[in-house]
Image: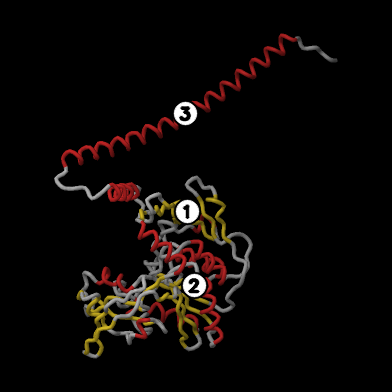
Amino acid sequence: MNKKVSLGICISLVIIAITASFAVTMVISSRIYDGIISGLSQRSVNYKSVEEIENIVSNYFYGSVDGKSSLSASLAEGYIKGLNDNNSRYLDSEEYVAYTSKLEGGVTGIGVETAFDYRTGDFVITHVYADSPAEKAGLKALDVITAIADVPVDRFNYSVLSENLYGSRLSAVKVEYERNSETKVVEPMLGFRIPSVSGRLESNVGYIKIRGFYKDTASEFKSEAEKLIEQGAESLILDVRGTSEGTVDYAAQVIDVIVPNIQGNIAVLKDEKGNIYKEKMYTAESSSIMVPYIVLINEGTSGPAELFACDLRDISQAQLVGTKTAGNGTTQELFALEDGGAVLLTVALVEPKNGADAVYHNKGLTPTTEVSLATGNDIDIDLLTAEQDNQFMTALNMLAA
């Protein structure tokens, strides 16, 4: 039976609906407004504090201010330091160029690897790359560098002085060194591109060291692995001890070279709310290494190198040999600034192949076979022979078994 609804009731229902919608809208708008005002209030307090400091400096500072640009840079650096995140930092214009150049082109320099031996007090060349300016100048592994740019090297300044051995500018650096008690001076040129991947054959086991995950690392790794396998390697030792530089993007590319095509993702980036950050999902689909391998890790294995080790363990059941890793499972993004610098900011958590349960951030990766160095962890691994490196020897014996 049909019933007619009076015009008055219809009008009343419309008015009620409009009133309810308006009330809901006002509640939502009020919350948004409160959030905006709260943010504005906090920013106002921040700006007021900076203004107060500027006034105090202007009126009372005993000295001269170098310029607004240096003050702005210091302010930006201080702001990022205030986040209490060791992975976020402000880069000035020179640091920004150097950082992006390293990611895109790898490390450049005279073509050597070095390490300071605290047992002897010597700054030692551990490796000289073929066809590099260092090799052409006559430098060899085990040479002891005694001075760089006329400044004597010691345990306190070797780290700073060693920076003179790296860079892309086309100039020479003066290097004084000792070999068999004889002192020589050479001036090799900078600008040589140092590969991020190197390897050697130990009997029928290939050893590959990855020093960073940069743009060309995946192609370098593929080439080195194929070369060693062609030379007779029946298994591989992949060394990411002390490796922390590079990006998750480039680490995922190397993982893609190694593991077979799998369903799902090898890594996903998650923001603070647990959402996928900028659709960042990585897959493995191109090729794979068809020999067994073991991954060497230690407390210096951090960031992209941890994703590398974690995924090889979870996808290919690779054994992890060494000591617990750093537990740095976040990723950073570069934001360019108008002053020519940039902010490198932590933006997401790295979730590896096995999801949230496998996240290693603030926990680190525990090795499947724990082995500490017999010499102690305070010595640079590059100073050890293969026989002295019991983490390497353990992996070698496991593959030979």
> In the rendering, at what x and y percent does residue 372 appear?
35, 73
Q: Which residue shows up at 54% across the image and 47% down it? A: 275
Mark 3 residue element:
helix
Residue for badge 2: 319
Rendered image: mark on residue 33: 3
> In the rendering, at what x and y percent does residue 63 appear?
15, 47
Rendered image: mark on residue 349: 1
Q: Counting other residues with Cα less than 10 Å from the Cα at mark 3, is it few (<14), some (14-19), or many (20 or more)?
A: few
| Residue at mark 2 to residue at mark 1: CA–CA distance | 24 Å
Q: Is residue 233 placed above or below 284 in the rendered structure?
A: below
* Quadrant assignment, res 12: top right
* Front position in the image: 308 or 193: 193
Q: Counting other residues with Cα less than 10 Å from the Cα at mark 1, is it few (<14), some (14-19), or many (20 or more)?
A: many
The amino acid at mark 3 is Tyr
Mark 2 residue element:
strand
> In the rendering, at what x and y percent does residue 134 appear?
35, 82
* Front position in the image: 24 or 316: 24
